[in-house]
């Protein structure tokens, strides 16, 4: 029921191609992130799933049903909007009860319809039936907002609004949950708490969840799997560790985590791969291609050789000069210039350690299995 | 998918109906009048669509279309003179208004002049009084038996201080009752220039008056010119003042057009004057828009900057006294009307000879129907504009329908008397013979005042983000249910504020009422007008007071609502 399959999805807005042949499979109960810079098509993909955009081409399959022709209000995918889109003229309770009212509207006769419209326009006119009251109170308790049920939306903090939006979507028991940049309107500290709250609720309910974000840290820390998108195309789908250690393109290497993106010339010597980066011959265990290649080295995989005498024992040695250092608390990040290339080098910092001054000449090393050739 | 198509079509049908409404009651009448100005005979375009004979005769008339009537107009000094007089009037009024407003606007925008709030509050009075009542108030102030004349003669003056029945009289009424239209844009214009610039000028050694002339004024100039153009259009289109005050030997285009149609049924003349009026008004409206769209106002729309206000005591006192004088004239005019309404008789003297409520009981016994008519007609126009404006704002905001936006602002350009003539011409024969019915009156009021309603609902609609509607749909609601339960309640404040504005302006409406209202549907404005023409000044005054009270009550209600909305 809760699986999502996106097949050859293409979307054009007039002449501009917003999505190019997107294929994604999401399994039931998965927490899936669509990650990419703004304008990459991640929100359009989500809006196609919700039914707010009609695909130009391709299919969207929820469970085992093609939903292309099902209108947005019949798809039963809960969506948490970036702006939350809470109804400002209703209180918390009425906001959460909205979808239950709509369900009630579809049942019963004319009299019932009038009653439901009546209470949607003014909650003082007609009271809610018990089955709605209980359900709303239960979900409000679950997101710890039961004490605020009579508040107007404008009287809530950002985090509380976020939880109302979540409760409003969850109460309709959606087959999948869509979240559009759910944390972007919150301050740094609240963001971390909400990350955990959302993750906990998702695990708890086992609901298939797709969320859109441009923040790689957010995607990495929350999602089971991530699809990285750029310019309307899916670049790579994988688990966070996959993406970090085996990026398929320099774009992903750069977008997911921090990297040193270098240009090099790869060649095979005696069945071993070597890549020449601006004069430095680096040994690598990757052997996909030779000739002009992109080389990726993560900053934390570069180590400073403290003792000159040890230098001979390493496979790869890069000599360079410290341009400046940035103290980040538990780590110190150096900008090291070697030839025409700049390297970021992260070293753990223990109190009492001295920090290399700009101008100092250093020798760096990196394990052959950490030299990625793309 | 079928559901989507059905709803989509539903909305499409409504959109086409709105287009049809404006085509039928605005574009077609204006186009007909345009044709009539060449043929010299009434043309029945609607009839030509359903009846072959009518079509043939229309074709015939069109074949004989020529420029004779235009040539005639230029040759007959009457029309050309009327146009020149009208342009002259508008030019005088706009120039004088600007000169009158510069010190007040400067005082409000840039100084700590005393009584600033009182002055601002009193500026509302001219806006709520229909111009023909202001014109009439000037007669009972400055006329032969007016109290101003009494004081003037007491001080040794001969005859009258100003003859209200003259160009001067018309100019003065328009200046004193239109200046608030220019004042607020000019206040905004003066806020554009920065105090630091003036201080820089002083620091460089220039004198204060020099700084004002060469720094402050030029910076405010775009705003001032735009205000002048606005006043020009308002003055040019105004019917209430000239119809009361214009002497026989002073012909003005609005009065001339009214006489041609209401007095002589001269279609050729009325049509040409209508075309000229619309073209002139449209040209100045376009010119004004050009100025507003330009580079001025740039810093007004942004965050309010902290303004350092001048506290030069001497200058501020002078400004304050001057401003109070200007704003007190409309107030005195209103007080005069009020006293007249309570007077038994009022000859040449500072105060009425005696007081009575008889004028009011008279009004209620004889003219109760007019009050009722006004309310029914205004309510009809209100309902029609609420429905149409709500949909228009939806189309304009959600579907970016710029064509609809353009058509619905067109009525702002068409002078009331021109719209009236165009509608009468088009709808006085079969197949749609509506002239003389309450329906066409309501339609005319609606067309004329709907831009206010649209402005109000559209700005509220813009505040309702699209994703709120999407959220409702996502939660299972159909577009229709979402519209009723979410968009409707959120749009309410805009509808309420716009409604009152429409209601108020329809009750005030002069030109359409005088031109188009049949006897059995005569609204208050027409009754007051006829009373003034018949010389029944005391009942006219009583009814004017009732009208102003209705307007005042509704207006303050509107202010209350819009203040609540903005909170």
Image: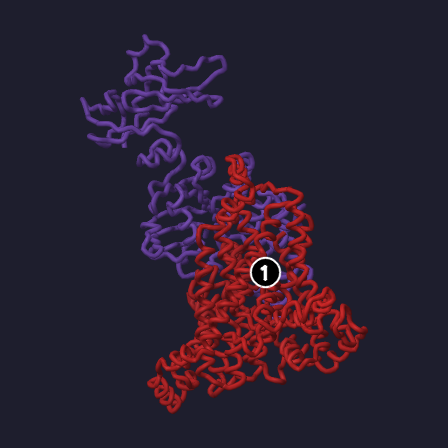
Crowd class of label 1 (few under 14; some 14 to 19; many from 20; radius 10 Å)? many
Q: Residue at image x 46%, y 42%?
A: A31
Residue B148 pos. (x, y %) = 70, 67
Q: Give the residue drawn at x 56%, y 76%.
A: B512
The chain displayed purple equals A
Q: Quadrant of residue A295?
A: top left
Furthest-bottom residue in this view: B53
State the residue at coordinates (25%, 20%).
Answer: A280
Q: Quadrant of the N terminus of chain B?
A: bottom left
Q: Which of the colour schemes (rainbow, by chain, secondary structure, one colour) is used?
A: by chain
Q: Could you tell me residue A175's position as x and y percent?
A: 49, 52
Q: Could you tell me which chain the residue with mark 1 belongs to?
A: B
- Image quarter for residue B287? bottom left
Front residue (pair A366, B309): B309
Above/below status of A249 relative to B325: above
Q: Quick check: B166 above or below A321?
A: below
Q: Is residue A116 visible?
A: no
Left or right: residue B81 versus residue B506 is left
Q: Name the residue furthest left.
A: A270
Residue at label 1?
A: B179
Instruction: Answer with left or right where residue A348 lies relative to residue B263.
Output: left
Q: Residue at x 40, y 50 (%)?
A: A45
Position of residue A314 measured from the top left corner of the image (x, y, whole percent) = 30, 15
In the image, B159 versus B213, the foreground residue is B159
Regarding mark 1 in the picture, which secondary structure is present there?
helix
Residue B25 shows in the view: yes
Q: Is residue B152 left or right of residue B459?
A: right
Which colour represents chain B? red
In front of the other: A309 or B36: B36
């Amino acid at each position: 029921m809760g699986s999502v399959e996106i097949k050859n999805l293409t979307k054009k807005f007039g002449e501009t191609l917003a999505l190019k042949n997107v294929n994604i499979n999401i399994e039931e109960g998965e927490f899936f992130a669509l990650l990419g810079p703004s304008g990459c098509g991640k929100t359009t993909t989500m809006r196609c799933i919700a039914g707010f955009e009609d695909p130009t081409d391709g299919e969207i399959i929820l469970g085992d049903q093609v939903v292309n022709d099902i209108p947005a209000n019949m798809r039963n995918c809960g969506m948490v909007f970036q702006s939350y889109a809470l109804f400002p003229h209703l209180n918390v309770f009425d906001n959460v009860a909205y979808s239950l009212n709509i369900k009630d509207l579809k049942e019963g006769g004319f009299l019932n319809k009038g009653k439901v419209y009546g209470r949607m326009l003014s909650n003082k006119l007609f009271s809610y039936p018990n089955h709605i009251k209980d359900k709303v109170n239960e979900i409000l308790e679950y997101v710890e907002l039961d004490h605020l049920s009579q508040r107007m939306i404008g009287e809530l903090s950002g985090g509380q609004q976020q939880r109302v939006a979540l409760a409003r979507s969850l109460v309709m028991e959606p087959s999948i949950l869509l979240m559009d940049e759910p944390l972007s309107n919150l301050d740094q500290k609240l963001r971390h708490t909400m990350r955990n709250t959302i993750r906990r609720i998702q695990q708890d309910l086992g609901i298939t969840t797709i969320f859109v974000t441009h923040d790689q840290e957010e995607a990495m820390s929350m999602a089971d799997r991530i699809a990285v998108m750029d310019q309307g195309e899916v670049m790579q789908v994988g688990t966070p560790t996959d993406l970090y250690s085996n990026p398929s393109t320099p774009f992903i290497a750069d977008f997911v985590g921090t990297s040193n993106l270098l240009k090099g010339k790869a060649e095979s010597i005696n069945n071993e791969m070597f890549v020449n980066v601006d004069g430095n011959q680096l040994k690598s265990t990757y052997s996909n291609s030779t000739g002009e290649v992109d080389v990726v080295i993560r900053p934390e995989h570069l180590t400073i050789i403290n003792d000159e005498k040890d230098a001979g024992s390493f496979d790869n040695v890069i000599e360079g000069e410290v341009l400046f250092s940035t103290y980040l608390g538990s780590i110190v990040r150096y900008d090291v210039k070697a030839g025409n290339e700049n390297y970021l080098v992260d070293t753990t910092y223990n109190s009492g350690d001295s920090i290399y001054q700009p101008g100092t000449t250093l020798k760096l090393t990196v394990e052959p299995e950490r030299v990625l050739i793309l | 998918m079928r559901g989507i198509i059905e709803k989509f079509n539903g909305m499409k049908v409504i959109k086409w109906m709105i287009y049809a409404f404006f085509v039928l009651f605005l574009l077609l009448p204006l186009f007909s009048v345009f044709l009539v100005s060449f043929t010299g005979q009434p043309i029945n375009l609607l009839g030509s669509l359903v009846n072959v004979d009518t079509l043939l005769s229309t074709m015939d008339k069109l074949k004989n279309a020529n420029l004779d009537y235009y040539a005639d107009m230029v040759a007959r000094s009457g029309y050309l003179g009327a146009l020149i007089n009208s342009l002259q009037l508008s030019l005088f009024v706009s120039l004088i208004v600007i000169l009158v407003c510069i010190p007040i606007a400067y005082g409000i925008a840039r100084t700590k002049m005393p009584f600033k709030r009182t002055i601002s509050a009193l500026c509302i009075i001219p806006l709520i009084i229909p111009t023909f009542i202001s014109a009439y108030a000037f007669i009972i102030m400055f006329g032969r038996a007016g109290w101003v004349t009494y004081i003037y003669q007491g001080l040794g003056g001969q005859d009258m201080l100003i003859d209200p029945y003259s160009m001067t009289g018309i100019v003065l009424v328009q200046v004193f009752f239109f200046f608030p239209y220019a004042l607020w844009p000019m206040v905004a214009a003066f806020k554009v220039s920065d105090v630091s610039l003036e201080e820089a000028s002083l620091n460089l050694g220039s004198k204060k008056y020099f700084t004002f002339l060469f720094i402050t004024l030029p910076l405010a100039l775009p705003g001032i010119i735009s205000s002048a153009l606005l006043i020009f259009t308002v003055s040019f289109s105004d019917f209430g003042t000239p119809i009361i005050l214009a002497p026989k030997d002073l012909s003005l285009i609005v009065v001339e057009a009214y006489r041609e149609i209401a007095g002589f049924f001269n279609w050729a003349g009325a049509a040409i004057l209508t075309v000229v009026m619309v073209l002139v008004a449209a040209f100045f409206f376009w010119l004004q828009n050009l100025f507003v769209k330009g580079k001025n106002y740039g810093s007004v729309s942004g965050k309010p900057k902290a303004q350092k206000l001048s506290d030069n005591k001497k200058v501020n006192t002078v400004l304050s006294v001057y401003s109070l004088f200007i704003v007190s004239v409309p107030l005195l005019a209103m007080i005069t009307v009020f006293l007249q309404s309570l007077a038994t008789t009022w000859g040449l003297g500072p105060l009425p000879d005696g007081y009575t409520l008889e004028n009011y009981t008279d009004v209620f016994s004889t003219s109760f129907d007019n009050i009722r008519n006004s309310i029914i007609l205004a309510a009809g126009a209100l309902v029609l504009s609420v429905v149409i404006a709500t949909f228009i704002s939806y189309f304009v905001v959600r579907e970016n329908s710029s064509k609809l936006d353009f058509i619905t602002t067109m009525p702002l350009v068409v002078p009331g008397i021109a719209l009236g003539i165009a509608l009468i011409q088009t709808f006085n024969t079969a197949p749609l013979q509506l002239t003389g019915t309450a329906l066409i009156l309501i339609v005319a009021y609606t067309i004329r005042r709907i831009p206010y309603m649209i402005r109000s609902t559209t700005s509220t609609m813009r505040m309702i983000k699209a994703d709120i509607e999407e959220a409702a749909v996502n939660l299972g609601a159909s577009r229709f249910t979402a519209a009723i339960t979410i968009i409707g309640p959120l749009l309410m404040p805009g509808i309420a504020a716009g409604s009152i504005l429409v209601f108020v302006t329809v009750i005030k409406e002069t030109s359409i009422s005088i031109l188009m209202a049949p006897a059995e549907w005569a609204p208050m404005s027409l009754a007051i007008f006829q009373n003034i023409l018949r010389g029944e000044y005391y009942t006219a005054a009583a009814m004017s007071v009732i009208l102003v009270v209705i307007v005042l009550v509704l207006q303050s209600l509107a202010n209350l609502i819009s203040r609540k909305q903005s909170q």
